Image: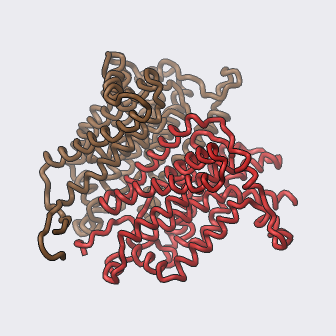
Amino acid sequence: MMIRFIKRDEISKKKDITIKITSVILALFTFSIVFMLMDKNPLDIYASMLKGAFGSAYSIRETIKLAIPLCIAALGVAVAFKMHFWNIGAEGQILMGAFAASIFALKFGTMSRPVLLLIMMVAGIIGGSLWALIPAVFKAKWGTNETIVTLMMNYIAIKWIIFLQHGPLKDPNAKGFAKIANFTNNAILPEIFKVHIGWIIAIVLVIFIFIFMNYTKRGYEISVLGESEKTALYSGVNIKKTIIISILLSGGLCGLVGMIQASGISNTLVEGVSGGVGYTAIIVAWLGYLSAPVIFIVSILFAALQQGGSFIQTSYGIPAATALILQAMILFFVLGSEFFIKFKIVKKVGDAK
Amino acid sequence: MNGMTTFLAAAIVAGTPLLFATLGEILIERVGNLNLGVEGMMLMGAVIGFLVGLNTGNVFAALIGAMAAGAFGGLIFAFLTISLRANQVVTGLALATFGSGFSTLVGKQLIGQTAPAAVKSFFKPYSIPLISDIPVIGPIFFKQDAFVYLGYILAVVIGLYLYNTSKGLNLRSIGENPGCADAASINITLYKYIHILMGGALCGLGGAYLSLVYIPNWQENVVAGRGWIAIALVIFSAWNPYKAILGAFLFGGLDIIGFRLQGAGIHISQYLVDMLPYLVTIAILVIVSMKKSKRNAPPKNLGTPYFREDR
């Protein structure tokens, strides 16, 4: 008897989701070993993570604040990934979006609030999309590997912000401390239900991207191009133009995240304005099937994981890095589980091959 | 020694962790797998190497520990991408995240600790008799520590292995055309596993050089992005271990140039100079892709999983 793997033709959505959820549960289960090594009861810890993320009105608000940038950035990443453009430069695009928005916030702090915020949003979107455009042009022109270029540009962006912090934009009133001046109230996003309005923007964008990707010609062209460049070429898709447009959209969404974080969370431009959101967004986009509604749900779960992670840090003294490993673990298991979605196992009796 | 020689000698030291990681990733990509998790494997090697070194005071135990940690990272990647045919890009990114969390968690208790004296004295610069007396070249290349010499040797050994042995030919053919290699009854899965694990071990060594010799005390995120530069260096060196030597030392120079410029009285913001390695990497990638010569092309099957029944 011999075990063989055969490619599945099609799998029902329900079975697909069951496999993925099972793999997440298996990841949590496996990770329990780490907690047991720390002499902690894993069930207690998972329970208190849940409590830390959703246990009170305050913790729910904190979780939502973490979910907003994850969700929007993951939408941006998904648009690029759909085209098989491996944009891992979300982090840099977020930083540059924050930079562009901050320039206006610092220069025109006395402008009327709605006008200033609108200008900052546009600036953020443009900042992020221009930063994403650079690797896209290289890719469209010469086929340059976008993964490494986008990644290198993350480092350049962060060095740029640190440079601004220590040099041109250093706040003279900060008593020698290298920081950029805080925004005026006019440059800070208003709150609804005690959470800055980024959450409304996120919901609107989820709907917009869902419609764009599924019901517009351009969105369809992006998917076709991702599936096969040849098919796209034969069916008359303008490949270069499609690459450029979708990357502008992808970078623009990330740039908007930068604006939201600088305005709604840090109230100024700091090097940690993104704080790894750009990388986590890649995981969120992938786990969310690159589909807007699923990304919405996954981003809340990941925000809960982070919020819960920092909760157990204070209540159990478990380092926050544990949540990082747990994230990676979940991703490993889900990646592995795709094998069982794509292939089925058959037992074959008799001669092999 | 004048200023230029000291600078170049220091560039080689700074380039050595890059060299190990680049050689490791070359082995991995040559069998057709694109592992973006170099940063993670280096961090795992850095922390385990440091931990073992601190607890045993034994250099070899530390190095073996670092290699095992890097190889373990490689094993996760290999299992997912070879046996379960998972997406290599995303798996690599997950590995980078995993390694970073792993090193932070394990290294929590090590922060502020210094590498043990036994390790430090073992890796003191050692002048090789005769050749270290050659003017210019001697002081730059042959008054270094044992790790640096190991780097030279490994690059040459891997070069000979790839281009001058039948095993090396087999391995290159897997990266180029696994269908053909399979038909020639080369055990593809075994080759892939072995070389990805070896590559991971080398990345682990590169990380250990940083934590045990270069810094040499434990601080969070000691690798600081060098793993990603190594991936770009693989492209720069066109998957060729000999060229990797040149690339790694060039980038080692870029890594330390900001500090040196300050010393030389040239006042340009440190933070802008820090951008140099990344800018140069992009420039190189663009130039390589513009030329698109066949010699510098990546292994043809890089990034795609092999499934026999797809043939």
The answer to whether A289 is drawn above or below residue A223 in the figure is above
The answer to whether residue A116 is above or below residue B268 is: above
Position of residue B222 relative to residue B79, above or below, is above
Residue A341, image x and y in percent? Answer: 20, 54
- Given residues B201 and A275, the one toward you in this image is B201
Chain drawn in red: B
B104 or A59, which lies in front?
B104
Q: Position of residue A263 (x, y in %)?
A: 46, 26
User: Relative to B263, is B287 above or below?
Assistant: below
User: How many marks on residues?
Assistant: 0
Specify whether residue A253 is in view.
no
Chain coloured brown here: A
Residue B223 in picture, x, y percent from top left: 58, 48
Q: Residue at 38% of width from left, 23% of height from top?
A: A62
Task: Measuring from the top left, give residue A160's x and y in whole percent.
Answer: 59, 42
Left or right? Give the position of A255 relative to A104.
left
Asked whether residue B86 is in view, the answer is yes
Identify the image quadrant of the N terminus of chain B. bottom right
In this view, the residue in front, B128 or A151, is: B128
Scheme of image coloration: by chain
- Horizontally, residue B193 falls left or right of residue A205, namely right
Picture residue at 77% right of the left edge, 55% below the top? B124
The image quarter containing residue A166 is top right
> Quarter of the image containing the C terminus of chain B?
bottom left
Which residue lies at the image location 52% right of the left edge and 70% below the top edge? Answer: B239
Q: Is residue A95 left or right of residue B126?
A: left
**Image point 54% across, 48% down: which residue?**
B43
